[in-house]
Image (cartoon, helix red, strand yellow):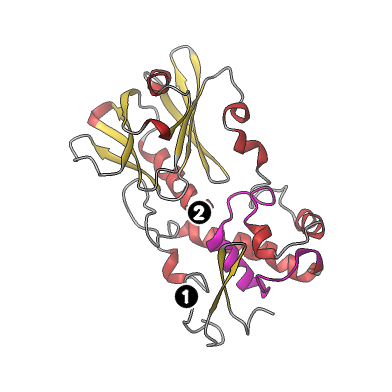
Amino acid sequence: MPELPEVETVRRGLNQVTLNQFIKGGEVCLERTVAYPFNAGDFLLGLTQQSLVQWHRRGKYLLGELQNSAGAGGWLGVHLRMTGQLLWLPQAVPLQPHCRIRLFFNGDRELRFIDQRTFGRLWWVPPDQPLENIMPGLAKLGPEPFSSEFSVAYLEAALSKRQRPIKNALLDQALVAGVGNIYADEALFLSGIQPTALCSRLKSKPIQRLHQALQQVLAASIRVGGTTFSDFRSVEGINGNYGGEAWVYNRAGKACRVCGTPIERIKLAGRSAHYCPTCQR
């Protein structure tokens, strides 16, 4: 699933190519991809003749701010989920097998939502509705990892109340928004914490290192356009490059880049965790 760096990469790309252009219409190729309104025709009608004035990101959600001749036009919400991609293409490009939604813009360009697993969702949020009412997942998100709310003091207090492995806690979007499997593994490696360590038993110093490591790996991945192991692409169709720099994620059996010990992979609550048994204690 695309995580914060991948979604941020898409956000920046969308801001480069789609702003201040009118949506002339579109096509819904798979109706269940539209989460709201519940009718695909109403979804397209709500977006038509709107222009995108800015794309925002909240956790793993993309939020396109809309405007029309009367003023505020609501929001276009996107969640890529497992395999979603947003591609900016000429309309003449043949449709991909898993194209779910097309939005037509000026200059014969279009924004296509491609999604092989079909878990991704799009919303049109009318201007008279709060975002959280239509996209309730937004209300459940914790602080952004680069925000002032995500402080060391916040992280210490939040972890002290959790009786679960730290790897599982980092995947909880209510703790910190946007972090998933890849960057939880990477941050735990850089902070020297085993993924099985119980949150409530972590001391202040390791938590400080974890706070710094989370920001470090997320920023590093954003700089190189995120991670592509299978499906993620930028709006231009370009792979992310962080995978080649990963410390532990997806490197089971390979030598640790620091000490040479083979990286191990375990399962925690049905999710994989990669770590170095020497560097992480």
Residue 196 rendering spot, x and y as whole percentages: 68, 71
Q: Residue furthest top?
A: 70
Of 97 and 259, the residue lying toward us: 97
The label on residue 104 is none
- Where is 242 relative to 134, above or below? below
Q: Is residue 189 in the magenta section?
A: yes
Residue 214 rendering spot, x and y as whole percentages: 62, 61
The residue located at (35%, 27%) in the rendering is 21
User: Dividing the image into 4 quarters, which one contains the C terminus?
Assistant: bottom right
Q: Amino acid at mark 2?
A: Pro
| Circle 2 Cα neighbour tier, 10 Å, few/some/many (<14 / 14–19 / ≥20) | many
Q: Amino acid at mark 1?
A: Arg
Q: Is residue 153 in the magenta section?
A: no
154 relative position to 34: left or right: right
- Where is 194 relative to 29, above or below? below
Q: Earlier in the sequence, mark 1 or mark 2?
A: 2
Secondary structure under tag 2 reads helix
7 relative position to 236: left or right: right
Residue 198 rendering spot, x and y as whole percentages: 75, 67
* Range shown magenta: 171-200
The residue located at (68%, 46%) in the rendering is 142
Query: In front: mark 1 or mark 2?
Result: 1
Of 218 and 33, the residue lying toward us: 33
Which residue is tagged 2? 5
162 relative position to 76: left or right: right
Which residue is tagged 1? 251
Residue 42 rendering spot, x and y as whole percentages: 42, 18
